Image: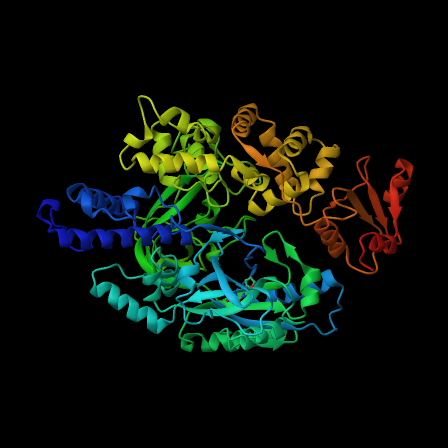
Amino acid sequence: MTAEIATTDLTPDEARAELARLAQALAEANAAYHTDDAPEMSDADYDTLKRRNAAIEARFPELKRSDSPSDQVGAAPADGFSKVTHAVAMLSLANAFDDSDVTEFDARIRKYLGVPLDAPLDYTAEPKIDGLSLSLRYEAGHLVQAATRGDGSVGENVTANARTIEDIPHILDDAPEILEVRGEVYMSHADFEALNLRQTESGQKPFANPRNAAAGSLRQLDADITRARPLRFFAYAWGALSESLADTQFGAIERLKALEFQTNPLTALCDGPDALVAHYREIEQQRADLGYDIDGVVYKVNDLSLQKRLGFRSTTPRWAIAHKFPAELAWTRLEAIDIQVGRTGALSPVARLTPVTVGGVVVSNATLHNEDYIAGRDNKGEEIRGGKDVRVGDWVQVYRAGDVIPKVADVDLSRRPDDAVPFEMPDRCPECGSAAVREPGDAVRRCTGGLICPAQAVEKMKHFVGRSAFDIDGLGSKQVEQFYADGWIKEPADIFELRARYGHGMQQLKNREGWGEKSATNLFDAIDARREIGLGRVIFALGIRHVGEAAANLLANHYGTWDQFDQAMRTARDGNDAWQDLVGIDGVGAVMAQSLVTTFGQDAETASIERLVAQLDIQAAARPDTDGSPVAGKVVVFTGTLEKMTRAEAKARAEALGAKVSGSVSAKTDLLVAGPGAGSKAKKAADLGIETLDEDGWLDLIGAT
Ligand code: 9MJ
């Protein structure tokens, strides 16, 4: 920002221009915060700009903008775009980091499909564009909607903005009646440089990298701003379709090209992992000369009927993987090691660094993982970095891979100051003073304060309002911290009491600094809108250790309703039926199961969860489209050898039809599918009088023959 003039000395024209700059800068800071989880602006700078904006508005109320940052509570993503529910979820990709990951990807696919190693299996390989994904919906050849990826199931409606992008056709000739084309919006290096020059010349903040510039430009509330930004689009995938595009991935890309979409010219057909890696090396060679950012190479199974059989694992397709380029590195000084306490009480050491640019982004913090990592050991006690420990004052090498939090990779002992001392992890929680204990087998030390620890309570609530959890517009980390500090919210249930407690009476939200009538009402409404919520989000939002977003969805799909989930978690123990049922879910191991059972066994936790649930209308998990499925809701057990498909595929298909696949036979089993060699399970099923089918009988039943 330019040097600050006292608001009383500003002319109306200067004030108008500065309000425009502030609106833009704060919107960009919000976008960076949300899209990258890596704010480019410190909280203090953000607050300074917001205060300056409020001061100018107070002096010139008539100049207050319709998109004034004062009316936007917190760092909600681009307030103002309507939400779009994707007809077909927009997926992300699993990652491969080295050649052996690629070989394993191929081996996994062959194993799943039962394709021998010496049989041919083709893949496509194409550059992974580092932009932001967009889904374009065409009906009868007309572009009717454009939506960002968002959380994969709900994105933002950016149709007006997408229409300004030259690479995006408005009308298609000879297209399927319904066609959703997906791809990446990006900015070329040349356009990025020119844009940044214009930004700095007009006194605005330059963008950190082309990806941020593309994201900031697409998510402008004013489409004319997007129009002035040179965005491009590569098509590489599709969502809903009224008829298939082709039989192969490669063919589908050619069809998209024939429909006049830009497709990447470096897309190649490869006959196995060796050819994939060879193409990766070729693209890596050309990377610097492409003129746009790519961060890896994407491999996809070419045969679309095989893609269909492979299907998905929670949020990523089994038939694709992104082979990432190695991370970028830089050296800088470690100024301090701070301890952060997370929602599960983990004490995490954070490196405070002399700011350094790594791959176009300024990095001043990095994770140091845990005390062993700092000491130069991995979680098995083996040496890393040749056993070198990390000390405050050291020169350290940091790296960023993709969007993840930067990490410390190495340390330069030749530059270590003489007075540097080995780091010691505190044995008390720096936030609440409770003992911090490291249990055997745990890599981290944890605060034992539980819900009395303010850091744990706040982090739990920040997680609760996060994007994949309750995602309440206007209620971000900052607001949670402030409300907690003032005693307005102590646990998630309190969020749903905010309107009742602070919507009227002595203390009111609208009277708080930074709030007003409109923003307060918006927040209360946004909270109420979230009372009706899906089961998977609720389970994830609880922030139970080891239960990530994917696992929460698996649990939701398995149990269907909150009551069934709750009941099962309270009864599962010591290998009983409920426990067996829980660990029988593909993707739920004993560690996660124990964590769930422990949480639901703690009175304070369950009381807090009950208070929350009383505020909510939890929607049963959306079942896969199982209309007419003969096995929807049935508990199926597979045993013995299957000959037509692998066990993994059988299980995935049964689940796609709404069945619950269990690993053991019990009174709850509805159906046993027994191949040759079935032993004790077949006997137990017979004893219990459970229906048993052979593989062909099963395929007949599900209509797969
Ligand atoms: C990018 N970013 O270039 C996919 N992608 O496919 C390519 N992303 C993708 N494919 C399925 N080339 C999900 C994501």
- Depth check, front residue: 505 or 465: 505
The answer to whether one can see residue 329 in this image is yes
Q: Residue at x 36, y 43 (%)?
A: 338
The answer to whether one can see residue 427 in this image is no
Q: Can you say which quadrant of the picture contains the N terminus?
A: bottom left
Q: Residue furthest left?
A: 9
Q: Residue at x 45, y 60 (%)?
A: 401
Q: Kindly indicate the quadrant of the structure image that contains residue 197.
A: bottom left
Query: As drawn, is 397 to the left or to the right of 20?
Result: right
344 over 409 or under it: above or below = above
Query: As drawn, is 633 to the left or to the right of 251?
Result: right
Q: Kindly indicate the quadrant of the structure image that contains residue 499.
A: top left
The x and y percentages for residue 639 are 83, 49
The x and y percentages for residue 162 are 42, 63
627 over 506 or under it: above or below = below
Q: Kindly indicate the quadrant of the structure image that contains residue 696.
A: bottom right
The x and y percentages for residue 630 are 79, 47
